[in-house]
Amino acid sequence: MSGQTFIVMGGALLLILSTLRLVRLRLLSIRYGIGWLVVGVVGVLGSPVLPLVSGRLDSLGFTATGFSLGVFIAFLGLVCLQLSVSLSGLSRSIQDIAEHAAHVEARVRQLEGESAPHGTPGSAARPGVRHDEVSR
């Protein structure tokens, strides 16, 4: 086994250990933790294969390091794509929650306006008090 194999395997093992720690501390969700564990396992299992295919890589014009970097860059692109999809979903959820909160606030203001007759202590007709101060 080459030094590059040990470096890739060590990095994959470090990824597995750090992922387990982050999931255990609840800093990383289990959903993403499983994905990173799969990546770590593929790194551990795939690193010994690299020297076996290096002869074929040479015939294609790649070095083992260049091929490894190409795979790594492709992987980072997929991670960026997946994070973009997750971020889009969260943005959509935040928009839905904000709209729902606005509807609830409008409904509460409407109900407060219907239930308090003018001139009572709960209404905005009190002298010197604005309606938005009463509702807070």
Image (cartoon, helix red, strand yellow):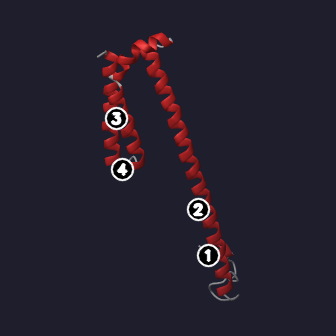
Verify CB contact (< 8 Å) between mark 4 and mark 3: no
Q: Amino acid at mark 4?
A: Arg
- Where's residue 90, x and y in %? 55, 52
What residue does disc 2 label?
Answer: 97
Residue in the foreground of this view, choosing between 12 and 117 = 12
Q: Which residue is mark 4?
A: 26
> Is disc 4 placed on a helix, strand or loop?
loop
At horizontal 31% and vertical 15% (from top left) the residue drawn is 2
Task: Name the spot of residue 86 as percent of width and height, x first.
Answer: 53, 47
Whole-percent x, y for residue 79 in the image:
50, 37
Residue linked to disc 1: 135
Q: Give the residue at mark 3.
A: 41
Q: Is residue 31 left or right of residue 84?
A: left
Residue 104 spot, x, y in % from top left: 62, 71
Q: Is residue 84 above or below residue 94?
A: above
Marks 4 and 2 sit apart, C-alpha to C-alpha, by 24 Å
Q: Earlier in the sequence, mark 3 or mark 1?
A: 3
Q: Residue at x 35, y 46 (%)?
A: 23
